[in-house]
């Protein structure tokens, strides 16, 4: 029996091998090759993938696991050491980018709300992609690597106010105040849940799993934790995936 999803995976793997080989020859980072593979195989490229939604779901799982693998290399102590860079460098990058992009968009006749929203989009980067590039070059502990990490952290935080302001930029004022309060309450609750889970619940669970000395059980537990913990997409809908 033919399974379309498996056929799509084979096609993606085959195309990625060719693209990554070409990128290696051209000295282009592998993460760029993966993105190019997705563009070529996707419905807006060559249209090689038929099970689009299923492949998108697998891609989201892959991004979650990638962020988990990146996250375990950073501790709260190391993040506190770059708090000045987070606040100063991150705020300057985001504000200046939004201002510049908004002015340029306004020159092309875009309304103020839409121009600011375009600035929001341009000011954000992909944490998964940028950190992957920094890791491949072994520059995580370098001065520019730490600065880049600080800016990415600030972008991850500032995306929440951006999402909350988007309805106002679109001119939707009815019931916005109540919605903002509900989203703010949900955000605070999720932050508390994540902090409590990261500090007490998850370490205890993983310790108990590790005592079994079962690699399979540990892998399944990690996968479940990655998918079960709250994410911005759970709180804000599909817009929450903008950072990825």
Image (cartoon, helix red, strand yellow):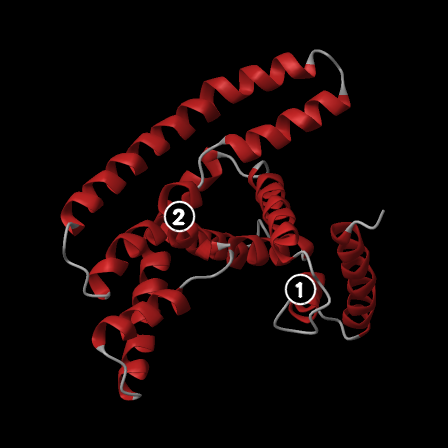
Q: CA distance from mark 2 to mark 1?
A: 23 Å
Which residue sits at x=36%, y=32%? 190
Q: In the image as oriented, which residue stretches furthest toward the front?
A: 1
Q: Depth check: 153 or 44 in front?
A: 44
Query: Does dot 1 land on a helix, a strand or a loop?
Result: helix
Tell me which corner region of the image, top left, top right, bottom left or bottom right, holds residue 69.
Answer: top right
Q: Is residue 135 above or below residue 103?
A: above
Q: Is residue 174 left or right of residue 185?
A: left
Question: Nearest the camera: 207 or 225?
Answer: 225
Number of other residues with Cα within 10 Å of mark 1, as a class: few under 14, some 14 to 19, many 20 or more:
many
Residue marked by disc 1: 38
Residue indicated by mark 2: 237
Pointers 2 and 1 in contact (C-beta within 8 Å): no
Asked if 73 appears above or below 177 in the picture, the reply is: above
Spot occupied by residue 112 in the image (x, y as percentages of width and height) = 21, 75
Which residue is pictured at 44% across the width and 35% down the height? 230
- Can the viewer see residue 139? no
Residue, x 56% and y 53% (percent of image)?
Answer: 128
């Amino acid at each position: 029996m033919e399974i379309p999803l498996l056929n799509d995976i084979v096609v993606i793997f085959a195309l990625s091998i060719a693209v990554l080989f070409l990128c290696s020859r051209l000295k282009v980072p592998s993460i760029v090759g993966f993105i190019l593979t997705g563009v070529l195989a996707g419905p807006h490229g060559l249209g090689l993938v038929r099970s689009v939604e299923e492949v998108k779901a697998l891609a989201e799982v892959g991004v979650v696991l990638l962020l988990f693998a990146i996250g375990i290399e950073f501790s709260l102590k190391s993040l506190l050491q770059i708090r000045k860079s987070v606040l100063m460098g991150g705020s300057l990058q985001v504000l200046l980018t939004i201002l510049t992009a908004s002015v340029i968009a306004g020159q092309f006749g875009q309304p103020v709300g839409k121009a600011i929203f375009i600035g929001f989009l341009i000011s954000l980067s992909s944490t998964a992609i940028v950190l992957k590039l920094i890791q491949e070059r072994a520059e995580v502990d370098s001065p520019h690597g730490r600065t880049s990490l600080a800016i990415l952290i600030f972008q991850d935080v500032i995306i929440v106010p951006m999402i909350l302001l988007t309805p106002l930029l679109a001119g939707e004022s009815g019931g916005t105040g109540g919605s903002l309060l509900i989203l703010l309450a949900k955000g605070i609750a999720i932050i508390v849940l994540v902090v409590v889970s990261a500090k007490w619940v998850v370490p205890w669970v993983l310790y108990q799993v590790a005592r079994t000395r079962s690699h399979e059980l540990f892998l399944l537990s990690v996968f479940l934790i990655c998918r079960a913990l709250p994410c911005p997409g759970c709180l804000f809908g599909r817009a929450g995936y903008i950072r990825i």
